Image: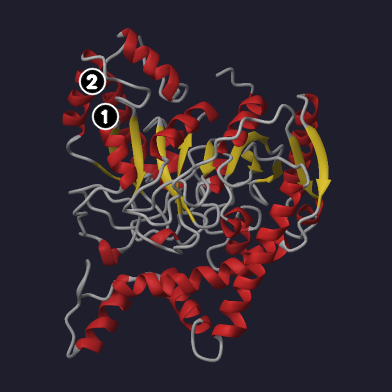
Amino acid sequence: MSIDLKSLTIRNTHDHLKAGDFSVMELVESCVKNIEKENPELNAFLEIFDDWKNQTEEAQEFFRSGQADFLTGIPIAVKDNILIEGKICSAGSKILENYRAVYDSTVASKLKKRKSILLGRTNMDEFAMGSSTENSAYGLSRNPLDKERVPGGSSGGSAVAVAMGGSLGALGSETAGSVRQPASFCGLVGLKPTYGSVSRYGLIALGSSLDQIGPFAKTVGDIEILFDAIKGHDPLDATTAKVLGSDSLPKDLVIGVPRDILSQPGIDKEVLKNFEDSIARLSKLGFHIKDISLPHTSYSLAVYYIIMPAEVSSNLARFDGVKYGLRKEGENLLDEYVKTRTSGFGKEPRRRIILGTYVLSTGYYDAFYNKANLVRNLIIDDFEKVFADGVHLVATPTTPTEAFKIGEKANNPLSMYMSDLLTAPANIAGLPAISLPSGFTEKNKMPLGLQFIAPNFREDMLFEAGKRFLGEND
């Protein structure tokens, strides 16, 4: 049978592989041919791993021996900040251009055990700093639905990999919506798991209290398969939880709509109309809709852009020309640091390092960093109160606008930062959230997304609501 990569899901591909309709080799060869055709223009993949044929043979053997599960033989693209032993992991930066990982991240290890095909590494904003994948040191990525537009960031390469038919699933990472936003811009499903439900061991850190690895796929069912594969306690990551959620699903799900967030400036009229249409659809499907207030959530973006740069300035201090990657010789140690970091980091990392160093400096630590953490607690309290008041999920649009034109916001960092307006609250509060395709804009026919946010460790409620919204039967 012919292999239509743009319509195949992980679940039905497994059925085809099990039935022998096509082999793992035929499936992966189709992906590779598609990447060779599309990638020169889209720039989603930075590299196709040279051992993909060996991985394919091992996966086929799992089918022959009856050990295969849903992810066996499934091509998965991996963001360039997730370590895979022996492979280059550059985080989209020149400072790590030739760095090869010496161990597997926990998520890569878990997928390898299932004999998934780790097909290649995908483009990203440098050190995951950006909302468009225009900040990569290896060139920008393009949206496959309109090549003059961005795919979203920072995990844009992983989103494009799935949308273009280069893989059936992908891993990205988030600090403020970097999985959900590109999923929305490219018409996919993207999940930001609860902080602590997926190990960050082997993820190059950006903001350690915000970072989370999350999957991309075409359906909620596929996202659930990927999440189940990578979740769980990890003794190598002390922030992972030992017990995940286990309560049964509520009989009737109540969805809260935070009208105060939706009244903020900067949200496009077409986005708001699509959101109201989605809420009406949810009501028809039997969900109970309730207006709620999250009074401190409007400060999420301000809090994020204080806490994140502060953590960036600490995390990126390790890239000094001595421990990892690029090294520029200098007249003395300080000169070596300066030359290495000046030539190795791009404009956006340098901007955030300077911001972070400033807010952590003597005299400003209490005024900015400590105050941001106090407001962060108020935002967490807002969510806890609405969940305690009988709301099961909070719904918002995923992004304030459709995918914007390449270069449109490149010279306006504040405008670019506003792209995270609706996704940042979930990262600030550590909550799980999902983006679902919810239709298209009327004028430009670009995809839009609906976001659900759930209480900690209740990804099951996200999956249940998402499947019903998209009409998935499994």
Colour scheme in use: secondary structure
Q: Residue at x 57, y 62 (%)?
A: 409
Q: Disc 1, disc 2: CB below 8 Å? A: yes
Residue 162 % position (x, y)? 43, 35
Q: Is residue 298 left or right of residue 366?
A: right
Residue 441 % position (x, y)? 69, 39
Q: Amino acid at mark 1?
A: Lys
Q: CA distance from mark 1 to mark 2?
A: 8 Å
Observer-nearest residue: 14 or 249? 249
Q: Quadrant of residue 449?
A: top right
Q: Residue at x 58, y 66 (%)?
A: 304
Q: Which mark is on residue 62?
A: 2
Q: Secondary structure at mark 2?
A: helix
Q: Secondary structure at mark 1?
A: loop
Residue 90 can be seen in this image:
yes
Q: Is 122 rendered above or below residue 99?
A: above
Q: Is residue 231 left or right of residue 121?
A: right
Q: Residue at x 56, y 48 (%)?
A: 181
Q: How many marks?
A: 2
Reading the image, the residue beneath label 1 is: 115
Residue 45 can be seen in this image:
no
Q: Is residue 221 left or right of residue 393?
A: left
Q: Amino acid at mark 2?
A: Phe
Q: Is 69 rendered above or below residue 266?
A: above
Observer-nearest residue: 402 or 379? 379
Q: Which mark is on residue 147?
A: none
What is the quadrant of the N terminus in the image? top left
Residue 157 % position (x, y)? 41, 46
Residue 59 % position (x, y)? 23, 24
- Mark 1, residues whose alpha carbon is within 10 Å: few (<14), some, or many (≥20)? many
Q: Residue furthest right?
A: 291
